[in-house]
Image (spheres, rainbow, N blue to C red):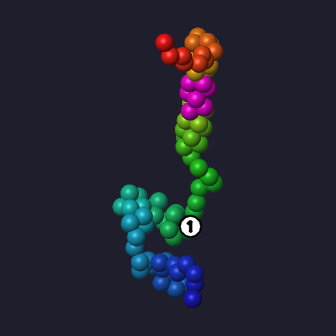
Amino acid sequence: MDAHPQPFHDGTKVQWAWDSTSLGWLKECPRKYQYHMIEQWRGRGESIHLEYGILYHAVRGQWERSRAAACYVTLLHFLGPARPMTRP
């Protein structure tokens, strides 16, 4: 028995089991369904737009953290060294 059974009848391209993904591809574009489900085409990798967004947000987060750290150092410099509290 296969570890991952195919949703097609043996030796044919007739699909007997439908999931939301394959049905969505068929409703969206029959050619997209054919390429993805029947011919098993897959993309080479992630979308360039997705890669750009991931990198942008990583750099932006790092920039925000460094800005916050710089503000903290400036605040410590402005306040001066910590002095022990004394009671009057």
Q: Position of residue 25 (x, y in %)?
A: 42, 61
Relative to 83, residue 63 above or below: below
- Observer-nearest residue: 74 or 41? 74
> What residue is pinned by disc 1?
40
Q: Residue furthest bottom?
A: 1
Relative to 33, residue 13 above or below: below
Q: Quadrant of residue 20?
A: bottom left
What residue span does the magenta drawing correspond to?
61-69
Relative to 39, residue 17 above or below: below
Residue at position x 59%, y 18% in the image: 84
Type of amino acid under label 1: Gln
Residues packed near mark 1 inside 10 Å, few (<14), some (14 to 19) or many (20 plus): few
Residue at position x 36%, y 61% in the image: 27
Q: Is residue 33 left or right of residue 3?
A: left
Main secondary-structure element of the magenta-colored stretch: helix
Residue at position x 47%, y 78% in the image: 7
- Observer-nearest residue: 83 or 15? 83
Q: Position of residue 80 (x, y in %)?
A: 61, 12
Label 1 sits on a secondary structure element that is loop
Q: Is residue 8 visible?
A: yes
